[in-house]
Image: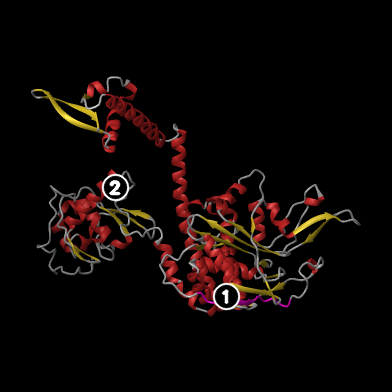
Amino acid sequence: MTQTANRPGASDSGPATDQPTIDTDNQNTAEVASTAAEFVSGHHLAEVLGVKASADIVETLGPEIARSIIRWHHREVDEVHESENLEDLLAVPVESVQVVVAPVITRADVAAWASDTGERDPHAIVAERRAETEARRRLNTDYSPMADRTAPKPTTGLRGVLDGHADLFDSSPELAAIHQFARARGAGAWATLGGALVRAVLGVPHRVTLPPIIGGPVSLNLLLAVAGVSGGGKDLSDAAASAVIDARVSGAPTYWDPFPVGTGEGLNRTFAAAHKDTETGRAKTEFHCRSALFTVRDIGAFDALADRRGQTLVTELLKAAMGQEIGFTNATIEHRVILPAHSYRLGLTAGVQPGNGSSLLGEKAVRDGLTQRFLWFPVREGRRRPPVDEPQPISLDIPQFGVTVDPLDPDDVDRPLVHMDVAEQIRREIIAVNDAKDEDVFGRTSDPLAGHRLLARLKAAAALAVLHGRTSVDLEDWQRAGSIVSVSEAVVAEVAAASGDAAAADAAAQGRLDGHRSAAADATRTSVADHELAEKFLSILADRGDEWTPHRSLVSGVTSSRRRSIEPALCLLAERGQIERRRYEYQKGRTRDEFRATR
């Protein structure tokens, strides 16, 4: 016999007799039991029903329920079980099952059960649930009786992640300075950190790469997405990121003026131009810069560019993030600007409104890997911070990794790459994740994005190393980069949810415009008809001054197709305070509604 744990307050001989009893004439027993199952976590169903041992079950609930079937969906094994062994069923922990009580239950003594805040009366909970259900129905919202009533607000998850990794800014003097500088400038610390990482990487020679731990070498090129509403502070954080670092490359002060993103071909032409070689007659590429910062002030502009027919911006960005060859073999030599792999250093920052991130978070973007190419940061920290004094900018001599050649040297392409050192433990972790793909012939794993996540983390760790003036990635950089990736993934989740809601709203709005494509359009047409009829009634009543007009006289000219709008139109005018309405007894025992315009 399966025994259940004793419920606090229950006796050893059976159910407590002084506990409230559900009267089946007034309460739905199945609903009470289901509600109890939802509210009690870690207790057994037998305890919820007020019985502590199977010996009491038949006596308490009667022989009918002992022969009935209780079905449940066990989430761990994902199977539906049926059983008539009530003893076993009631011993199942409530926290691991979703209970559905059979409708044949006719009576039960339901005891009070423990909640997080103390004892609660089952009658009160059922009444509360019914009131909430009715309220939600009146608001015409979806409602699930088993929904998590303590579900966090949409930003709670992200805020929790931010709070959990806030100590990142205490882990080094450089990061602490960035945090204080951002607060002093009224900018978000995470967004400012992201911009600082991009700028630190821009000063690294273009031939410096991450080592070929798996596959080939990977560029340090970095893409950043800062999420926030219009006016939320994206420009503030970008300005703070630009000012917080006093960067020097080979001893010379360095600053990167951002270029607006245009077409895919515009990326490569920012770095170089092509002309015909006078000796060979072939196209020759000449670099005029090796490092460039691009910016997308609002992702809406990116959407417009990416949606153009024949546009190559997204594909070129995907390649540029990895430092691959970009450019096209155009028919015209002057337009044939092709940048070899790892011949340029590129950074990009994009402002993304939470409800408008579909271009970077849509199904195609995720499938292509565009989403994972970006590090995502929130524009704010979700907490008010006291004002602080602005510290001095970080003086950073960006490591040059022993590269002393002029970056515009035309023979640069023939020189070997320089790889950053990466700690052995980090290498082993990356290799282990890749090896896991060997178990499936198509390389599928339980976490298909693990490789993208590790690459983003390695890039972030490399940028952190550079920000601290080092030429190698150590375990401390790796740990800090783990915080950055955790925040990035939390931001992606929030923006994806907001973008999905916005897309649904856009679809509904489109339906209203299209009319016949959705019920929302019907509501729009009805609303227009109501307003038009309301204006007609108001005009009639205004012409009659203080005279009370009977309902029949007022609506006599309304066609049959518009009669459904009569009452909504009158209610609309009354809510606006534009008309008065009264019930008038024009004969003994006979009344009618009358109206007049307000004075």
Quadrant in which residue 321 is drawn: bottom right
- Residue at position x 45%, y 37% from top? 511
Q: Which mark is residue 136?
A: 2
For disc 2, the neighbor class at 10 Å (few under 14, some 14 to 19, many from 20) is: few
Residue 394 magenta-highlighted: yes
Coordinates of residue 225 in the picture (x, y in percent): 55, 60
Count the numbered circles shown.
2
Tell me the quadrant of the picture where the N terminus can be found: bottom left
Residue furthest out toward the right:
279
Can you say whether 520 is above or below 447 in the image? Answer: above
The residue carrying mark 1 is 393
Give the magenta-colored segment's residue range. 390-402
- Residue at position x 50%, y 61% from top? 233
Question: As drawn, is 218 to the left or to the right of 534?
Answer: right
Question: As drawn, is 119 to the left or to the right of 459?
Answer: left
Tell me the quadrant of the picture where the C terminus can be found: top left
Quadrant in which residue 202 is drawn: bottom right
Query: Which circle's residue, 2 or 1, is located before the other in the chain?
Result: 2
Question: As drawn, is 484 to the left or to the right of 153?
Answer: right
Can you say whether 499 is above or below 520 in the image? Answer: below
Q: Nearer the viewer, mark 2 or mark 1?
A: 1
Quadrant in which residue 571 is drawn: top left
